[in-house]
Amino acid sequence: MEMKKWKEAILNEALRAIEGMDSSARFLENLKRINRHHDYIHQSIMEKTDRELRAIENPPSFSYCWVEMGSGGRQERTVWSDQDNGIVYRCKEQDQPAVIAYLTKLAEKVVNMLEVVGYPKCDGLIMATNSRWLQSVEGWKKNWEKWSEELSLDTIRYLLISSDLRAIYGDDGLVQELCSWWEQQNGSTSLRQRLVPYSLHQRIPIGFFGQLFTKTHGEYAGMFHLKEGGYYPLISMIRVLSLRVGIFPTSTQARISRLAQHSYFTPLELQEWEEALAFYLRLRLKNHVYLLSKGEGLHDYIQLDDLSKGEISALKHHLVFLKKQQKHWLKVFDKEGGLYA
């Protein structure tokens, strides 16, 4: 199927997902189908570009895997997402300069092609064209060790981004090896403890009396930010709890399910988490489809007046739930030795 038709398929799946929101489980299944379309686009570009470049460059033997992070890594893209990608590779030591040169060219071509077909480049340069995210297996491990020791705001961000790593194209065994190593490291260091303040102190935009807080100035003044206003605090809490246990599935839904299996959530809390996740992803998807239909740039700001009474009620309910969970887990981590230990 040509690229235009795949993009049309994504939009059609998005419309079905929005209209068919009769259960959280059904919506999340629809979202998986949307993300499989996104994956296919990425894989098609990777396969074609790699084949054509190898015919020209004839690089030495090596293995590699193109990886996604961010919403792509978590399989939570809507009709759009910017790029968050990288490369993991393995080769003989003497071949490394030639392999790096080849993969650098490949990354440039793929990143540019992804931009052409509708995936904007990452403003924060979380892309395979940045040498930080184009590393050998051992290079990734060394970076993770270094970032775990430094734990500045930047390195904490890099670690959290890395925890969403997912194989897209190539030798996924390299990613499996990294994930296994990462899980072992988290079990033997205080890393997870140090990540708690960053992940559990995000502001939940609802007041004591149920008032919703909107942006106070700028282009989107008076609008509610869906990503910062619920979705990102949700995925951040689930991510740090998963690191606490040593869970590495990158889908937020899979992480929630695994945490419940480890008795982190009661059956009722499991339902609350899944419903909150589906709610925020659905509103983001609905907003992006609407903006796309108007030919506007995609963003995560919405007018609260555009939501139904039921949606406003659900939004407040989920925000209150997230606030309670945030407070609960802060207490749990504090009892284990202090948040800043």
Image (spheres, rainbow, N blue to C red):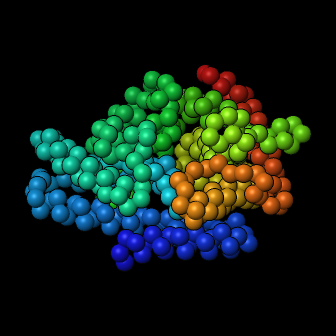
* Left or right for 275, reference 180: right
The residue furthest bottom is: 1
Image quadrant for the C terminus?
top right
- Residue drawn at point x = 35 percent, y = 64 percent: 43
162 or 309: nearer the viewer: 309
Residue 161 in percent (x, y) is at: 48, 42
Residue 338 in percent (x, y) is at: 67, 23
Q: Is residue 142 above or below residue 233?
A: above
Q: Is residue 26 above or below residue 288?
A: below
Q: Quadrant of residue 168?
A: bottom left
Residue 329 in percent (x, y) is at: 72, 37
148 or 218: nearer the viewer: 218
The residue furthest right is: 209
* Left or right for 173, reference 34: left
Q: Is residue 33 above or below residue 158?
A: below
- Residue drawn at point x = 84 percent, y = 41 percent: 211
289 or 59: nearer the viewer: 289
- Residue drawn at point x = 89 percent, y = 39 percent: 209
Q: Quadrant of residue 337?
A: top right
Residue 313 seen in the figure = yes
* Left or right for 202, reference 161: right
* Left or right for 39, reference 320: left
Residue 18 in percent (x, y) is at: 66, 69
